[in-house]
Amino acid sequence: MRYIMNFSQSPLVINNANKKQSSSDLIVQSSCRSVLQQPFVNFTNNPSLINLQQDVNSALGIAKENSNYYLDTIQPMIISNISSISAYYTMHNSIATQVPAGTSISDWLNILSAIRDQSKTYASEAHITSTLLSQFSHKLDNSVSSFYSVVDKLNAAILGDNGALAQNRNKLIDIQTQIAVDEVGITLGAISIVGGLISIVVGIASSFFTGGATITMVIGGGVAIATGVAGITGATLKLKGDLKLKEILLVEDANLKNEVRVAQACSAGNAQLAVCISQAAQSSLDMSNAWGFLSNDIESLINDLNMGIISGDKVRELFLSSANNQVKIVLKDTDIIKSQMSGIEYVINPKKYTYDLINVN
């Protein structure tokens, strides 16, 4: 029977979706915190750029607002989902151990209806998170375009090379995409693993010497990493290398003037946040779908009980088998993830380069 296989697999689908969503959340958190650490820019050495300075800072201010929105509104919803998974499967196990053989069909229907309704509540909550993230992702896509337009205006105002700017931007998009891939590999490799310690590291992404002073760019200098887990050293080394490549792209293009480099770094950090949010939106959709699949599986059991296709004792066997196998994995992993998410180490040092703050164990 197909639903029996679905019922046994749905805990693992929920578990995998939770791991991916937790990984995405860590990466978004790191990007948000780098945005919030970034001071507003100052072009007072070039009075002709004051209006454009305001435009850059306005775009940067929007990026800060977006970061706060995620941390204050969406991130707690993701943490709540982890607790919902734990609560649901604890309830699942109590059914497996406390409902005796020979329980009537009527009683089983009441039990299944109760957990179906609870799963639908969790599915609804996950759907709200997914919808908010999807809407937020579209909003950030628009903010990225707006920020790029500001940089283009600044570049034109100081007679910069538009071709060089576009080429540099495309290279930054490529390296930031790779950095995101590095982070996914590291965090997914550590999530739910005993001994895996999660850190969010925020440092300098690049720095420029202009007007007699050094300007440090922290925006885009946040990453999520892990230690204490075998098999992620290579990915961590790759991440350090890619962060160094990003610094080079932000600093060493001789065709870009310093003010443009500063604005380009800000817009690149904003674009990095948008990429992370887009990935988080997909992970959140997967989580919402996983809850939906679970609710449908329970609904199938209810229908089959009503139609006499399956007996109450057979339902009990399904719960017992799942409790002794897949659900054990889910509850163990969820407990570890709870501990990891509540025990994140924050390494924030806007005076050192991010790649120098990363320890490879």
Image (cartoon, rainbow, N blue to C red):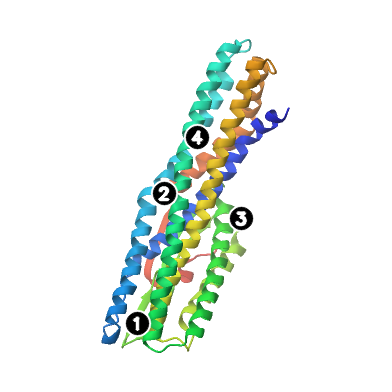
User: Mark 2, residues whose alpha carbon is within 10 Å: few (<14), some, or many (≥20)?
Assistant: some
Q: Which residue is mark 2?
A: 75
User: Which of pointers 4 and 3 lies earlier in the amino acid sequence?
Assistant: 4
Q: Which residue is mark 3?
A: 230
Q: CA distance from mark 4 to mark 3?
A: 26 Å
User: Mark 3, residues whose alpha carbon is within 10 Å: few (<14), some, or many (≥20)?
Assistant: few
- 303 relative to 142 in the view: left or right: right
| Location of residue 108 by image quarter | top right
Q: CA distance from mark 2 to mark 4?
A: 18 Å
User: Residue 286 location in percent, x, y?
Assistant: 56, 46
User: Which of pointers 1 and 3 lies earlier in the amino acid sequence?
Assistant: 1
- Which residue is pictured at 33% across the width and 59% down the height? 65
| Location of residue 56 by image quarter | bottom left
Q: Which mark, by number, is residue 86?
A: 4
From the image, state whether disc 1 or disc 3 is nearer to you: 1
Relative to 166, is 83 above or below? above
Say what secondary structure mark 1 lies in: strand
Relative to 199, is 306 above or below? above
User: Which of pointers 2 and 3 lies earlier in the amino acid sequence?
Assistant: 2
What residue type is disc 4 on?
Ser
Quadrant showing the C terminus = bottom right
Q: Which mark, by number, is residue 214?
A: 1
User: Residue 195 location in percent, x, y?
Assistant: 54, 49
Q: CA distance from mark 2 to mark 3?
A: 28 Å
